[in-house]
Image (tube, rainbow, N blue to C red):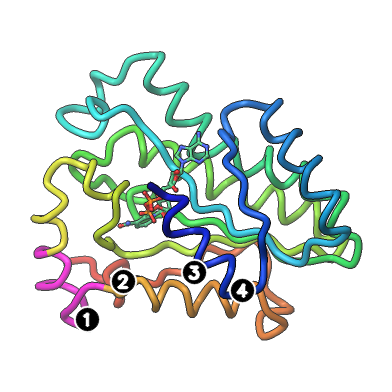
Amino acid sequence: MLERRVKPLAESVQSKFVEQCDLGQDDQIEATFGKLAKVWDNVDFVIHAVAFAAKEDLEGHFVDTSRKGFALALDVSAYTLTAVAKAALPFMKDGGSITTLTYYGAEKVVPNYNVMGVAKAALEASVRYLAADLGQKNIRVNAISAGPVRTLAAMGISGFRDMLKHVADKTPLRRNVQADEVGKTSLYLTSDLSSGVTGEVIHVDCGYSIIGM
Ligand SMILES: NC(=O)c1ccc[n+]([C@@H]2O[C@H](COP(=O)([O-])OP(=O)(O)OC[C@H]3O[C@@H](n4cnc5c(N)ncnc54)[C@H](O)[C@@H]3O)[C@@H](O)[C@H]2O)c1
């Protein structure tokens, strides 16, 4: 299903390189970057837009999260950033930019977001540690904290529609953020426009995160 959307996107930038890769499997990451080495010798930027948790862990009470569910969410949604950064490193010889996607549920309690909030908190901390590690290689690492956007992953969160309505009613801009607004910030983070920015979590949420009451 994803391939149907990703292939035309790749073609639009004259690329034939589209690979399926389960980032939960080190051998698949290695194989994918091995194939990449045959077509590209340099990578300027990486966008990490990956998250997963079991459906039962995105509803009800956080206290009920199982050990297995916790490990899965943290592995796929947080550790994979470090795994991909490590694999991309040999290709980023002239420096570059790594950007990931996070959410406000890392900072504050959001109903039903549960274990994903804990995973995003680990992801945001990983951004800072990776930024410190890779800065000397002129590789910048940042996160975009996006407001809720109707996507496949988001629809798996119980009560997501209510969340959209709540945010639209309460944000300073009185609306939900659009996917292309998140895209525009990732363009900023991957380009030289943000050459002095690393280790940051930038909110692209129509201002929702500044509201206290
Ligand atoms: N949609 C929102 O409201 C919202 C808000 C803030 C942050 N985010 C974050 O944006 C990122 C992208 O999510 P989205 O909302 O665009 O949904 P999406 O469903 O389009 O993207 C999630 C992606 O994760 C991939 N994925 C899951 N497990 C994987 C694995 N083991 N290996 C490789 N890829 C795997 C899926 O294939 C999918 O492409 C996620 O990190 C998500 O948490 C989304």
Identify the residue shown where x is 62% and y is 26%: 25
Q: Residue 11 versus residue 147: which sits nearer the camera?
A: 11
Residue at the spot of label 3? 202
Amino acid bearing label 1: Pro
Q: Which range of residues does the magenta coloring cover?
A: 165-176
- For the image shown, how many numbered marks are present on the structure? 4
Identify the residue shown where x is 49% and y is 58%: 6
In space, the residues marked 3 and 2 are separated at their CA atoms by: 12 Å
* Pair 4/2: label in front: 4
Residue 189, image x, y percentages: 61, 73
Tell me if I can see residue 53 in this picture. yes
Above or below residue 119? Residue 153 is below
Residue at the spot of label 1? 172
In space, the residues marked 4 and 2 are separated at their CA atoms by: 21 Å
Amino acid bearing label 3: Ile
Q: Residue 90 versus residue 205: which sits nearer the camera?
A: 90
- Mark sitting earlier along the chain (4/3): 4
In space, the residues marked 1 and 2 are separated at their CA atoms by: 9 Å
Amino acid bearing label 4: Leu
Q: Are marks 4 and 3 in contact (CB under 8 Å)?
A: yes
Identify the residue shown where x is 24% and y is 34%: 58
In space, the residues marked 1 and 3 are separated at their CA atoms by: 16 Å
The mark found on residue 189 in the picture is: 4
- Left or right: 146 with respect to 199? left
Mark 3 residue element: strand
Q: Is residue 166 magenta?
A: yes
Residue 152, image x, y percentages: 29, 49
Amino acid bearing label 2: Ile
Label 4 lies in ligand 1 vicinity (Cβ under 8 Å)? no
Q: Are marks 1 and 2 in contact (CB under 8 Å)?
A: yes
